[in-house]
Amino acid sequence: METVETNSVSLKRPRSEDDVANADEIKRQKILEKSKTGNDSGQSIETVTEQPEDRKNEIIANEESEEQEEEELEDSDEDGDPESFADMMKHGLTESDVGITKFVSSHKGFSGILKERYSDFVVHEIGKDGRVSHLDDFSVPVDDEDPSEETFTVLSDEDKQRLEELQLFKNKETSVAIEVIEDTKEKRTVIHQTVKSLFPGLETKTEDRDGKKYIIAYHAAGKKALANPRKHSWPKSRGSYCHFVLYKENKDTMDAINVLSKFLRVKPNIFSYMGTKDKRAITVQEIAVLRITAQRLAHLNKCLMNFKLGNFSYKNHPLKLGELQGNHFTVVLRNITGTDDQIEQAMHSLREIGFINYYGMQRFGTTAVPTYQIGRAILQNNWNEVMDLILKPRPGAEKGYLVKCREEWAKTKDPAAALKKLPVKRCVEGQLLRGLLKYGMKNIISAFGIIPRNNRLMYIHSYQSYVWNNMVSKRIEEYGLRAVPGDLILKEATAVHIEQGDVDNYTIHDVVMPLPGFDVIYPKHKIGEAYKEMLMADNLDISNMRHKIRDYSLSGAYRKIIIRPQNVNWEVVAYDDPKIPLFTTDLDKLEGKPLPVLPTDGKFRALKMEFSLPASTYATMAIREVLKMDTSIKNQTQLNTTWLR
């Protein structure tokens, strides 16, 4: 994940606190205690048995009918009371809990509010060709084969619903009859074209019934006609994929794809993209979709909130995850306290030295059970613990129905009973409970396998990230910001050790550190041994990272320890109204909205900053380096809690 998902964050300096380590963490903490030395700025910081078949059927039935209700529940429960949220987040993680303890710059830190408004955080994707994605063109490519604009209004919502059910074989009807009001040949032609365009796989004919004209829609070739429905009406001369720029506000990428697919009446898997973008931001990225016209996509601009689609083109290829070069960030930190000199020092250091390339807090979850603990249990092949960590009651910020589900599970260990407490069954907990219902309590591995693969792998990747963060903190503590013999660097994508005679040829910006796995090598100094000790404390063998289940075998990877952002620019501005935007977005420019006139001597000051980062780096870690602040939500609970909304 390249962008950052936190709630609005005021990074002030409340009193620090010491958390008592969990009993199962004590052994690990002893080994790692040297790397947990706090920040370098010298200031305190806060920032059973299988279920009967009839019970299985009772729970699993009617999945499709639940989807709308689940979405409404998820949306309605998204924002709770801010004070209770702040109180619950006291059970969350701090940066030091996940190995984030060091800074590279020497300036004195200062306070600021990150994401007071989601529009204060804007992300533009950078493609593999280095081009930054912008939404700056709503025009649709001219195509003689496109249907007329009337296509989108000639059918009523009821007609569309009936046709969709016919298309997807959701009822027993073999045809749908649409009465032609104000009958003309032209009108009938438009209806024929509309049905075939919007509902591929259906054919139409005209019939007279009781003196009235009807368009009859029916299946052309049975269910096989739906195997690849878009092939029926797609010109051979046109590229199969429509590429477009998606501008979205306060929605993550998967949510956006699900909304688009619902409006287009297609499956989400026909969309492709290069990277996921998080929710609490304005993001601009490229999307590709298979055999959906630009005209249909552009029509969505009239009916969708918080989305805009544009910059359409047809190409012969989809997009692939990870193909992007990175992201360009525009960030506003409001109500800053730093002096002009502090800010200049901080931003110059960011531009010239960079920041530690830690995995950010969102990598590890927001509740009292960190995702890396579940990942560790998977790697240990401890499936009872995996089940327990996911389902057991936990303190902290969670939706009410999840709390009730966990309480029921703790009381009964009955997946059917726990599922009944869970109206939203597409969450990880619901998926695991369905798996337990299907496969039984003695087959947790298969039950866990019901969870989508990417979600399952997220847990073990979180554990890798946890190890990496801790080892990098220890590396910087031991050797500082210089390359030393035994460090690793990449030569044509192959990791090699720095030898004593070559050490002057490299800087800290060349050094990489491994994420643990069976296909990596480790540093030839103290940190190499520290890796072994940390995994040994977790009952894992660093020399045997292959898992008996292939999906969970870790090959490992290399990651630079220091990242120097590109295209770094900044400006300090004064303002009076915390609700006014401090820069214009792509949509503002398209709509001709001017930037508000700002006072020269306002009540508040804000730091506007821009920078570009490679893929899979965390903008919050760059901002952390500027402010010298802990970016975890836990360390924001003593702040004005309205900022947490």
Image (cartoon, rainbow, N blue to C red):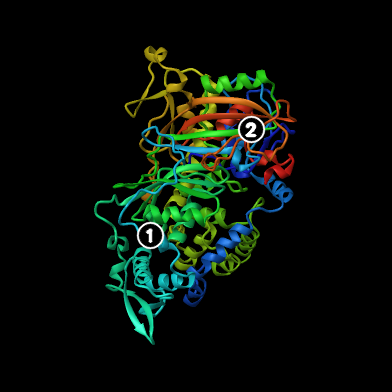
Query: Which circle marks residue 388 in the picture?
Result: none
Is 248 drawn above or below residue 94 in the view shown?
Answer: below
Residue 229 x, y percent position in the rendering: 31, 63
Asked which secondary structure carries label 2, the reply is strand
Crowdedness near tag 1: few (<14), some (14–19) or many (≥20) residues, C-alpha within 10 Å: few
Residue 332: quarter of image? top right
Q: From what the image shows, is residue 548 above or below residue 529?
A: below
Above/below status of 58 relative to 331: below
Q: Position of residue 183 (x, y in %)?
A: 39, 75
Report the residue that reaches farthest toward the bottom: 210
Query: Is 619 left, or right, of 287 in this rendering?
Result: right
Q: Position of residue 44 (x, y in %)?
A: 70, 28
Q: Nearer the viewer, residue 163 or 31?
A: 163
Is 276 situated left or right of 76 in this image? left
Q: Secondary structure at mark 1?
A: loop
Q: Residue at coordinates 61% horizontally, 59% vertically from top-left?
A: 402
Q: Amino acid at mark 1?
A: Ser
- In this rendering, would 361 be left or right of 310? right
Which residue is nearer to you in this view: 506 or 389? 506
Task: Choose mark 1 or mark 2, whichever is in front.
Answer: 1
Judging depth in this view, the residue of 312 and 24 nearest the camera is 312
Residue at which label 1 appears: 148
Residue at the spot 68% in from the left edge and 40% down from the top edge: 579
> Is residue 537 visible in this depiction of the protein?
no
Is residue 408 among the parts visible in the rendering?
yes
- Horizontal relation, residue 232 to residue 460: left or right: left
User: 10 Å neighbourhood of mark 2: few (<14), some, or many (≥20)?
Assistant: many
- Return the residue found at the far left: 236
Q: Which badge, 1 or 2, comes first in the chain's sequence?
A: 1
Mark 2 — residue?
A: 333
Type of residue at label 2? Leu
Q: Position of residue 47 (x, y in %)?
A: 67, 35
